Amino acid sequence: MNDVPTPIDPEAARRPVREAAPAGAPDPGVDVKRLQKEILAELTYSVGRSPETASPRDWFVATAYAVRDRIVDRWIVDHASKENKPEKRVYYLSLEFLIGRLLFDALNNLNLTEVAREALSGLGVDLDRIRTAEPDAALGNGGLGRLAACFMDSMASIGVPAFGYGIRYDHGLFRQGIRDGWQQEYPEDWLSFGNPWEFAHPEIDYPIGFGGYVEQVSEGGVARHVWRPAETVEAVAFDTPVVGWRGRHVNTLRLWSARAGDQIKLEAFNRGDYVGALADRVRVESISRVLYPSDETPAGQELRLRQEYFFVSGSLQDLVRRHLEEWGDLRSLADHVAIQLNDTHPAIAVPELMRLLMDVHGLDWDEAWKVTLATFSYTNHTLLPEALESWPVPLMERLLPRHMQIIYLINALELDAARKRHPGDDGLLASISLIDESNGRRVRMGQLAFTGSHKINGVSALHTELMKQTVFRDLHRLHPDRIVNKTNGITFRRWLSQANPGLTSILIDAVGPEVLDDPMRLEKLAGMATDSGLHERLIDAKRANKVALAKVISDRLDIQVDPDALFDVQIKRIHEYKRQLLNILETVAIYNAMRAQPMRAWMPRVKIFAGKAAASYHQAKLIIKLANDVARVVNSDPTVRGLLKVAFLPNYNVSLAEIIIPAADLSEQISTAGMEASGTGNMKLALNGALTIGTLDGANVEIKEHVGDDNIFIFGLTAQEVEARKRRGYDAHAAVEASSMLREVLESIRNGVFSPDDPNRYRGLIDGLLAHDTFLVTADFDAYFAAQRRVYKLWRDRAAWMKASVVNTARVGWFSSDRTIAEYADDIWGVTPASR
Ligand code: 26W
């Protein structure tokens, strides 16, 4: 080894110097003693604590620094020189990255978990204890944000050179408390004790403009537009290295933080108006203060639009600068850069890139448009009409006047081209237009993202098909080569190896350690699906995970559950289309049945719920309250004899998911068909051996194709049937008439059996369901109830259940996000992964 890397932050200069390991090579000399020494040095010189006084958090920080140093060595080698530049880079633009804790990610990918465990244990410190001292980074709402985090892991693992770009929110998704059964939102403060994984780069900053006006200037007879913003904010970079599997590649997650520029009235400050001057600063810097906590309903406020433009502009300025440094000419941008838009949240990137190319770098429109179209691609994550983003034209004109001009011009050109191909088809023109004229004039971000992208993808086969038939029907007619499917995936490193080490070691014994590199090797397990020795080991591992979850339920809720009962799990955002209500109705049905025949041999089971509701989503919050009300009544009713328990675990996040998923027996994926774009929890649960009870929605359809009809419990209306029912006008009364069980369930809830303190609490909920059952809960109830009976029948035959469980684990290798990313690389980005 020769050169010691240049320290990239001043702190590093004081650290013990080690030799750099080249990317891909095993870290030399990572032995227990050495890591121990490094952790102690970090504790002393970076944290400033002695081992005697160090808290678990101090130990976590010291360990994180020691591990980070090893990543940084590789990071620097990976990014060492301009000569070493990759042919093409991917830029993943996402307003959300739901990353969770990072210590085990780093340890696991560097193969250091056991070394660290031993090193710490020699110092009298328990690795599992300090693991929980790390805050759970929740810079995302749900599926979309978690997908971005899995993709970052996979890109670094299979060797796709990439940057993730997003916002470094001071406050991530709110912390959920449950008081008296109701959701309470509390601020989240993940940065309050610092963040050992990130590097602040105050010197990497870009001006981001807002408001003002556009000037036309003439340069050598050529007209050029100059935007003169009324105010500017600085986007400052914070980098987190993302290390892939076996430490082969290290990518960067670059998050932007807002900093007031020098326009803050220093003058006022000098005059003594301190408060006035600071108020401006606070206002400007509020851009990166907090994640919008809405899921599926657009927030619609100006600050959200500011966030979108802020991070898009910082990211594009950054990548344009890098491209010019490396390749010199922006006309070749698309040869070396692929930009993925994660939903429409970064769609303003389309006119922003046009502006940078034309106004700042002097390309003409046609050149700029060619580059733009070849560079962007866009992922759609939802078809729910209320979730499709659009912004009022007057707001856009005020905040982003130059972008609005460009949007109008893109629109005019697209509409012209369409008119030529389909003369007289006004419906088509109205549907593809970037401007929605139907309720106030609004810019449709979906149409904008589609129009500016060469590829548009859905996230499951069914979802992609529905995209072609619904939201993008007409755009698809005009551009039939653009829409492609990329079924979601999950990183097995977090959701199998880290979350479920017990299962992982059984799998390694059964099919070989190569499975860690190639999840398709899980297939081999299918041949052992009836092996009783294997069953026994799996049952033991699952039981240990269930005991651990039972402890969490006991500690947090003071509810005692039987680890031998069936753990029936529904964990995801609370939303009417996800139909937690359907699950609660079934719970009540069982409860009613138990009370009617208390002495029957009821099969023990535990219904486990977790998830957050958007703070303003009253119906979702009422459903949380109902789950808790049902839990209180059922759990304390002696006639139930503890055979049915209900637990709503508060504050669902990545870390809680890592505890619940390995302990699940049954996975609830029961959305109204056609409404869940994909789902990814469904994949995590199946991988961990849970059987799915679900509708033919999202990726459930493909999970069914992989695991086989006998190993999944499918029920309910199909997407087509849902469509047909809705068209006809669905009437819940008929379904309720036909099902005495459903009637009884609804009546008991409506009459206050679960809300004796406020008997009318659920009247509105139940009457609403009967009047307009938008999500067809009543239509699917009987089928769902019947499917649950099939579940119990199989559960009673333990060998048959285990066989199905093994087949689930065996057949879901395809849902690895490594596969998903390889498909994006091949089909959308034109990048060849280095390690695949
Ligand atoms: C503008 C407000 C807003 C915010 C977030 C609207 C919509 C969203 C997302 C589209 C919500 C989301 O997370 N969608 C989920 O994306 C996952 C990853 O593709 C899918 O697995 C889920 O089915 C989908 O609901």
Image (cartoon, rainbow, N blue to C red):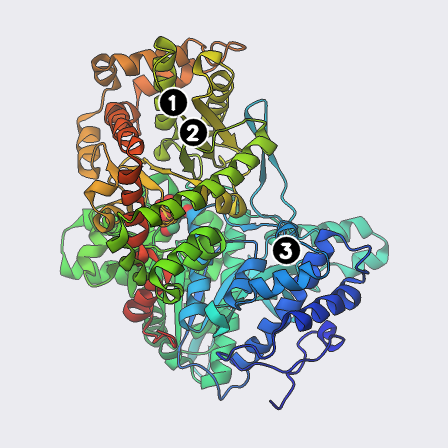
The answer to whether the residue bearing label 1 lies less than 8 angstroms from the nearest atom of ligand 1 is no
Give 186 or 449, whichever is nearer the viewer.
Answer: 186
**Local crowd size for mark 3, using a 10 Å CA cut-off: few (<14), some (14–19), many (≥20):** many
Displayed quadrant of residue 483? bottom left
The residue positioned farthest toward the bottom in the image shown: 2
The disc, 2 or 3, on the residue closer to the chain's N-terminal end is 3
Q: Amino acid at mark 3?
A: Leu
Q: CA distance from mark 2 to mark 1?
A: 8 Å
Q: Are marks 2 and 1 in contact (CB under 8 Å)?
A: yes
User: What is the x, y in percent for residue 144?
Assistant: 42, 51
Q: Position of residue 462 (x, y in %)?
A: 23, 48
Mark in front: 2 vs 3: 3
Within-10-Å neighbours for mark 2: few <14, some 14–19, many 20+: many
Callout 2: SS: strand
| Residue 649: image location, x then y, percent | 52, 33
Q: Quadrant of the N terminus?
A: bottom right
Left or right of residue 482: residue 57: right
First reached walking from the N terminus: tag 2 or tag 1: 1
Cα distance between the residues tagged 3 and 1: 39 Å
> Which residue is located at x 43 percent, y 81 percent?
86
Is label 1 in a helix, a strand or a loop?
helix
Does 800 sit left or right of 382 as displayed? left
Where does label 1 land, which residue?
587
Residue 314 percent coordinates (x, y): 54, 65
Which corner quadrant holds the C terminus?
Answer: bottom left
Q: Amino acid at mark 1?
A: Thr
- Considering only order in the chain, which callout, 1 or 3, is on the residue closer to the N terminus? 3
Q: Which residue is mark 3?
A: 127
Residue position marked by numbered label 2 in the rendering: 607
Q: Name the residue type under label 2.
A: Lys
